[in-house]
Image: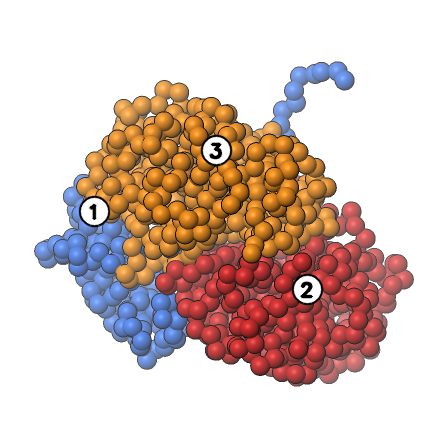
Chain colours: A blue, B red, C orange
Amino acid sequence: MSTSTPKENLVMEHLVSLTYSEELTPILERYVDALIDGRIVGHKCPSCGRVYVPGKGYCPICVVPTTDADEVEVGDHGTLTGFTIITPVAYYGQTETEPFVYASVLLDGSDSNLGGQEVVGVPHDKLRSGMRLRAVWKPKSERSAEGVSNRGWGSVSSVIDAFEPSGEPDKDRAEYEEHIF
Amino acid sequence: MAATDIAVVGYAQTPSTRRARESEVQLLVPIVTEALQRAGLDRREVGFTCAGSCDYLTGGPFAFVSNLEAAGAWPPISESHVEMDGAWAMYEAWVRLQHGDIDTALVFGSGKSSPSKPEEMWAQQLDPYYLAPLGVDPASLAGIQARALLDAGKATERDFANVVVRSRRNAKDNPNAQVAGDFSVDELLAEPYVRAPLRKHDLPPISDGAVAVVLARGDRARALCKRPAWIRGLDHRIEVHQPGMRDLTTSTSTALAARKAGYDGGPLDVIELSSTFSPQELILRDALGVDADANVNPSGGPLAANPVMATGLVRIVEVARRIVEGSASRGLAHATGGQVLQHNLVCLMEGD
Amino acid sequence: MAEQCAVIGVGQTHHKKRRDDVSIPGLLREAATRALDDAECTWADIDAIVIGKAPDAFEGIVQPELFLADALGGAGKPMLRVHTAGSVGGSTFIVGAHLVESRIHERVLAISWEKQSEGNAQWGLAGGRSRGIGAGGAFAPWIRAYIEKTGAPEYIGWQVAVKDRLNALKNPYAHLKLADISIEKVKESAMLWDPLRFLESCPSSDGACAVVLTNEANGKRASKPAAWVAATAVRSELGAFPGRDPVRPLAGVECAHDVYRQAGISVPRQEIDVAELYVPFSWYEPMWLEGHDIAGPGEGWKMVESGDTELTGSFPVNASGGVLSSNPIGASGMLRFAEAALQVRGLAGEHQVDGARTALAQAYGGGAQYFAMGILRSQPA
C-alpha cells in the first residue's frame, strides 16, 4: 500500500431544529395568574405541611396528591440560602456576557427555594448566605408568563426582575440549613 | 437458568390521550400509587425501582430526573433508569430480582408525545451520519417496510385494513384506548395514502400516557396477589440499524427473543404486540408463528393507543391483567424499540 | 447465591477535547476493541451489551445505541441502554455485572461514552435557554456550603486540582496533560463559578470506556489477573426538597454503607487501598471522603491537606487523574470502575498503587442525587 499525505478529517455540519409546544399545566397556569397579580402561591402538603412553590400537584416526599384546595400564599421577602457567581459560557442561545449572581431564595412561608435568582443592590463580594432579601416586582403592565414552563423550575424572571436586600437582620444558619438545595 | 417465579402482581395505567394537560410526573404519581395499592405494597418496602422514558419527548435533558418524584425517592431508594420503553425497565428490574436478596420491584414507563412533532423528533433517532440528514421519519420507513411486504407477496393492503378494523373494534372494550369504533375494510381502503401504501389509520395515534407495574418474587408474589402473572421467560434482541441491511418483511430478533424466552409455539390465550404500524402485526405474527385465529391485541394495541415509552410495558400489563383476573392462563407480550422493529422484547407469562 | 462477576477486560480511548479522527462508532470501537483484546476474546464471545451515556441532547441523537448496535456487533444480542445522569457509567457497569451475577449471560460488554465535540453540552445542560449555569454553577453553592460548614482553607481545592493533574501525567489515556500545573497556576486561573476556578474544574472530553464482565469460571481461567466484583449498589434521592443535605446526600451515605456491608468492610479508610471517586470539581474529593464515611465530619479536607490522597499517600484517590483530567461525561463513571479494576489487577502501569487489593469505585449524577458504587478486589470471595 502506498503512503500519501494524510487526508483532512471530513467534518459535516448538521444543525437540527426541533419545535416543542405545550400548554402550562393547570397548576402552573394558576401560579402565573397569581404572579401577574402580585402574589406568590404554592401548595401545602396535607400530610406533612411542607409548602412547595410552585405547587406540584403532589408532595414528592409523602407522594400524596395536592390540589387547588391546598393552595397557600407565601411572602415576597425571603432568605438567601446559597449562591454562586456565574461567569457565562458562550453557546447558542446564551445572552449573558457578564458574571451574574445565581442565588437560591427561601421565601417566607415556603419550604422550597426559588432557584437561579438574580440579586441586585449589593456588590458581589458582599453577598452572604443568610441575608434577607425582597422581590423587585416588574410593573404590573410588564409582567408575563414568558419563561415559566412545565420543565425546569418555573422561573419567575418575567414577573420579578431580581431580589434586593430588605434591610432585615441576617438569619442564623440553623434557621435555613435545611433549605440549602 | 433464569428464575421463573417472578411475577406481575400490581399494575395501573393512565388513559391514553392526544394531549394531557398534566406533566409526565403528574401522570405518573397517581398510577404508581394505584399499582402499589393494588399489590398492597407500601412504597418503602419496594426493593428496586426502574423507569423508562425518553428525554427528547419532553425536549429537556435530564427530563427523567423529575419522574423520580413519582417513586417517592425519600428516603433514598435503589433505582435505575433506561432511555427505553418501560418494558426494558421491567427487564432490568427482573434481572435485579434474580439475585434473590430482594423480592419486590416497581417499574414505570411514561411518555408525552404531544409537545413535540413526532415526525421531526424521531427522525433524529437514525444514524446521524448517513440517515438522519435525509430527514426520514418513522412513518416513511414503515411505508418502505409495508411496500416490501406487499412486493414479497406476503400481505395485501386489505390485510393491513383488517388489522385496523379489529384493533379499533377491540379497543371499544378498553377504557384507556384513544381510537376505537366499528369500521369496515372497504371504508378504510377508500381513504387516501399518507405514506403509500400506508393510510392514516395504519399509523398509531399520537398519545400521552404512563403505566406502572409491581413485580414480586416467589412467596412474596403469592402473598401480594391471589393469582400472580408469572414471568416464565423474558428476553430481548436487537438487529442491525440500517434498514437496508435486513429483510424488513421478517422479524428475526422477535423470533429469537421468543425462543430464548422459552416460547415453544404452544397455545396462547392472549397476545399483545407492539405493532405500531398495521403491517407490523402481520410480520410479528409470522415471526412468532401464532395461529391465524389467535387472540392478538384484545386491548386494541398501539393502533388504538400509543403512549411511546409506555406502549411496550402496557402490552405486558394487558396480558398480566387477563391472567390475574383469570380470563387467561398463558400469554405473550411484545415490546419494540427503534425504527421498523429494530429491537424486540418478548415476555411469556402464565397463571398458576 | 449469585454468581461471582469478574472483570477480565478493560479498555478506554485516548480522551481528548476533539476526536475528529473517529466517528462515534469509531470511538466506541476503540474502547471496546481494547477491552476485548485485554480479555483475550472476540466480538462473537460477547452475549449481551449494556451501553450508557449522559443525555442524548449532548450529541443531538435520540437513543444513539440503536445505530451503534451495528458497530458493536449487537445484531442478535440483547442491548440495554442505561441513563442515570452523571452516574450512568457506574450504573452501566453495575447492570452489566447483574447480568453475569444472575447467570443470565456469561460474557457481557458494558460500554459508555460521550463525544462532546459533536454537540454542545453547555447548550444541552441549559435546555437551549439563556442563563445556563453549567454543572459547576449547580454545584458551586453546595461547595460553598461545605467550606462554610467545615472551615476548610481555600487551598484545599487547589491541592486536589494539582494532585489529579500530576496523576494524569502518569496515565497515557488522560485528556489533560498539564506538566507545569502548580498551586499558583490554579490560584491564578479564572474564577468560573465562585468559589470554583477554571483549573479546579473538569474538561469536556470525547471518550469511551468498556469492560468485559464474565463469570467465576472464566475469571479464574483468564490468563491475566481478573478484578472481582465484591459489591455494587445504586441509590437515588429527590434532587431538591426541604430537609435535604446536598453537601452530604443521604443516598451517597447509604450507597457507601451498602457496598461496605456487602464487601465486609468495617473501616473503609483502612480496608480500602485505593479509591476512584467522581470528582468533577476539586472540592468534591473532600466532600465524598466525608459523604461516604471514609473521613469523619470536617476531616475530609484534612486528608487532602496532609497528602493522604496522593498517589503515594495512605489513601490514594484518583490515581488515574480522575474526572478532573478526563471527562467524557457518560463514560466518566465507568472509568472509575475500570481504573479501580486496573488497580486491583496490578495493571495500572505508571499510576499503579503498590499492593492495591481492594478498590472503591464511585460515580454520582444529577443534583448529587444518583449514586453508583462498587468494591473491586484482586481475589474472588
Image point (62%, 83%), residue name: B325
Given this view, does label 2 or label 1 mark the residue nearer the observer?
Answer: 2
Q: SS of the residue at dot 3? A: helix
Q: Residue at x 38, y 52 (%)?
A: C257
Decide: is B183 above or below A50.
Answer: below
Q: Are the residues flagged by discs 2 and 3 in contact, CB closer than 8 Å? A: no
Locate residue A175: give its quadrant.
bottom left
Which numbered dot is residue C149? 1
At a point 31% along the width and 77% down the height, the residue shown is A46
Look at the image and tell me whether residue A83 can be seen. yes
Q: Is residue C157 left or right of residue A90?
A: left
Find numbered disc 1 in the image and state the secondary structure of the residue it sits on.
helix
Asked whether disc 2 touches disc 1, contact meaning CB atoms under 8 Å apart, the reply is no
Residue assigned mark 3: C343
Nearest to viewer (mark 3 / mark 1): 3
Q: Which mark is residue B233?
A: 2
Tell me residue C334's x, y (percent).
50, 42
- Check the residue under mark 3 and report the chain it is in: C
Q: Answer yes or no: are tags 2 and 1 on the same subunit.
A: no
Q: Residue A113: percent from the left, percent from the top?
A: 28, 59
Q: Which three-letter amino acid code belongs to the residue tagged 3?
A: Gln
Real-space Cα separation, disc 2 to disc 3, in angstroms: 38 Å
In this view, the residue in front, B256 or C21, is B256
Locate residue B351: give its quadrant.
Answer: bottom right
Subunit ID for the residue under disc 1: C
